[in-house]
Image: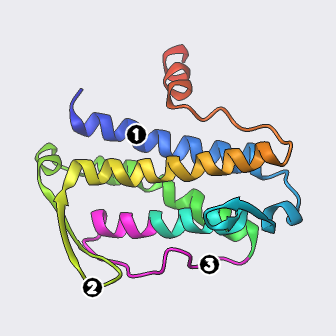
Amino acid sequence: MQLQKYFASLARYHAWATARLLESNLAPISDDEWHRHSGLYFGSVHRTVNHLLVTDNIWYARFAENHSLRLPLDTELHADRASVIAALSAAVGRWTPWLATLDASRFEGELVYTRNNGETVHIPFAPALGHAFNHATHHRGQLSAALTAMGRPGPELDWVYLLQQKTRA
């Protein structure tokens, strides 16, 4: 599979898994469960969803806008649930259209950006893009574990479920 097609599929998965988690599994939890410290790296579901938004914005700016956002990773971009969910839903949806604009040769290049500490980083483009999507998968997994600890069902978020849906359609 060509890298451009692979990453297009991964971007679709990123949007699908995020929507599934937000709409089906996190929507019904109480405000107390949303804000309660749940043993997650960023504490609560609320803080973790904000972190997903922060990092999606950071990586998208690096890749698509050639701009290095310098935000602390625990920044609370939205204090209320509806706003952070809407913002994250919009953020994950912008990857697929952007990827469609890239020339296949771009995946062989490098990504250059500035970290929060001011350090300039040069890394291979394709693995860095993989990291941006994989990082979100990591935190969606944490949120799934938090739901299970709350006695709620965790979502089926494996990429293979999206792939199976596409073959059935």
Report the Cα–Cα distance between label 3 and label 2: 21 Å
Residue 33 is situated, as x and y percent measured from the top left of the image, at: 84, 60
Assess disc 3: are there few (<14), some (14-19) or many (≥20) residues with their C-alpha within 10 Å of its C-alpha. Answer: some
Mark 2: which amino acid?
Gly
Viewer-side residue, 149 vs 62: 149
Mark 1: which amino acid?
Leu
* Disc 3 element: loop
Q: Which residue is mark 3?
A: 76
Mark 2 or mark 1: whose residue is earlier in sequence:
1
Report the Cα–Cα distance between label 2 and label 1: 30 Å
Badge 3 vs badge 2, beta-carbon distance below 8 Å: no
Q: Residue at x 81, y 66 (%)?
A: 36
* Disc 2 element: loop
Viewer-side residue, 34 vs 163: 34
Kindly tell me whether residue 86 is visible in this rendering: no
Q: Which residue is mark 1?
A: 10
* Disc 1 element: helix
Report the Cα–Cα distance between label 1 and label 3: 26 Å
Residue 118 image label: 2
79 to 109, vertically: above or below: below
Viewer-side residue, 89 vs 144: 144
81 to 92, vertically: above or below: below
- Would residue 169 appear left or right of 34 to someone viewing this image? left
Residue 55 image label: none
Residue 8 is situated, as x and y percent measured from the top left of the image, at: 35, 40
Magenta highlight on residue 64: yes
Mark 3: which amino acid?
Glu
Magenta highlight on residue 35: no
Residue 11 is situated, as x and y percent measured from the top left of the image, at: 42, 44
Q: Residue at x 50, y 52 (%)?
A: 136
* Quarter of the figure with the C terminus: top right
The magenta region covers: 57-79
